[in-house]
Amino acid sequence: MSFTLLADPIRVKMLWALRDGELDVANLAGIAECRPTVASQHLSKLRLAGLVEADRDGRRMLYRIRGGHVRALLSEALFHADHQVSGLPTHD
């Protein structure tokens, strides 16, 4: 996984939303406050990196985080970033 993918706020918002389950492009675009075409481009990058996977449900694609290890890694990375930004002390 490339941590540079987590440098984009749109991708971070989408990944954070996906930690609770599957969402389609329209919902992810709304959460990330971007157009669906932009959300699709970001999701393609996340799929290529192996962070998300998708299944077709009729005419739409449902995206989800790819496995528990990826979910845990993303949570820790985002919590670390939150500590860095907020000035909270680090812990083990």
Image: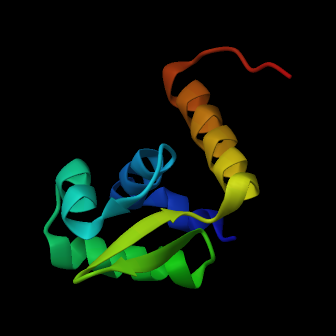
Along the viewing direction, whichever of 79 and 4 lies nearer the viewer: 79
The quarter in which the N terminus is drawn is bottom right
Question: Among all residues in the image, which is located at the extreme top?
Answer: 89
Measuring from the top left, give residue 4's x and y in whole percent: 57, 66
In the rendered image, the vertical position of residue 31 relative to residue 52, given as above or below: above
Work out whether residue 87 or residue 33 is closer to the camera in this orientation and state it. Answer: 33
The answer to which of 29 and 85 lies nearer the viewer is 29
Look at the picture and state if 12 lies above or below 52: above
Query: Residue 29 appears at what percent x and percent y?
Result: 21, 61
Left or right: residue 75 versus residue 28 is: right
Side of 43 where 82 appears, left or right: right
User: In the figure, 22 relative to 76: above or below?
Assistant: below
Corner quadrant of residue 76 = top right
Tell me the quarter of the picture where residue 50 sits.
bottom right
Q: Position of residue 68 (x, y in %)?
A: 71, 53
Viewer-side residue, 57 vs 61: 57
Residue shown at 22% from the left, 57% from the top: 27
Residue 86 sits above or below residue 75 on the image: above
